[in-house]
Amino acid sequence: MQQLTLYAIAIDDVRDIFGAHPELASRLRRVAAEHFAAPTPPKKRWFKPLLRTDADSVVDPVKPSGDDVEILLAGGFIKPERAAQSWAILSAWLQHLATRWRAIPFERAAFERIEWDLARAGLNSDYSLRNLAERDLATPLRPLPDTFAGYAKHVHVVETLAALRDARHNHDLAPETVAFVDPILDVLAAVPSDERLDLVATVCDASD
């Protein structure tokens, strides 16, 4: 299962994560520590074999690590095998920095049906949902296979909000369209109040 996650956030704030200034880096390290804290160390067991690796002290390579955090903050090279962990960290940071965000279950066939339903309801193709992620984030962290990430500028988001609200008022919309569009409108509605805000959209596996 995948999920679409939308963030009302300035694209410059996203890009500033990579090569973050000291104050921002310190703040984001704290966020990462809260989200990906290591398990509480167990009480010392005196009778464990001394020459065998203690499983309690082994770092799980599948989980995000401190090295992943530092590489992201430095804007360094992200190894392909650490991309999934890096996306988990970045997602936590975006949730922290965004003015508003929402995650929505995403299935590609359903998305195509929803886009078609909105077009039938009068939504201009310039304001289709996919256009909210048509611009590249231009960060060192690239999308994983079968996922995507992109953004829309403030002006386009504001215009899409108005157009999507009009389409939402069409009583012939399918229930799945309404259920999908309403949380999107909730995030878009946060953007007009601050001219710095853009919209970032990602589709990732729900576990990422």
Image: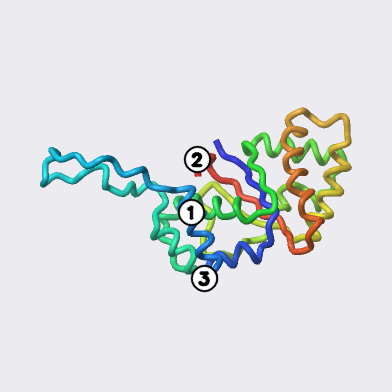
| Mark 3 or mark 2, earlier in chain | 3
Q: Are marks 1 and 3 in contact (CB under 8 Å)?
A: no
In the rendered structure, which disc, 2 or 1, sits on the residue that comes first in sequence? 1
79, above or below 45, in the image = below
Q: Residue type at mark 1: give it.
A: Ala
Applied colour scheme: rainbow
- Please name which of the two marks, 2 or 1, marks the residue nearer to the observer: 1
Distance from label 2 to label 1 (Cα)?
16 Å
Q: Residue at label 3?
A: 22
The amino acid beneath tag 2 is Ser
- Nearest the camera: 121 or 192? 192
Where is residue 156? Give x, y as percent: 79, 58
Q: Which mark is residue 32?
A: 1
Tell me which amino acid carries mark 3: Pro
Q: Is residue 101 left or right of residue 78?
A: right
Q: Which mark is residue 169?
A: none
Give the spatial CA distance, label 1 vs label 3: 15 Å
Question: Which residue is at 31% across, 49% downward?
Answer: 59
Identify the disc placed on residue 207.
Answer: 2
Q: Nearer the viewer, residue 109 or 6?
A: 6
Q: Residue at x 31, y 44 (%)?
A: 41
Q: Residues within 10 Å of mark 1 (few under 14, many from 20)?
A: some
- Is residue 30 something one can see in this rendering? yes
- Asked which secondary structure carries label 3, the reply is helix
Q: Observer-nearest residue: 14 or 37?
A: 37
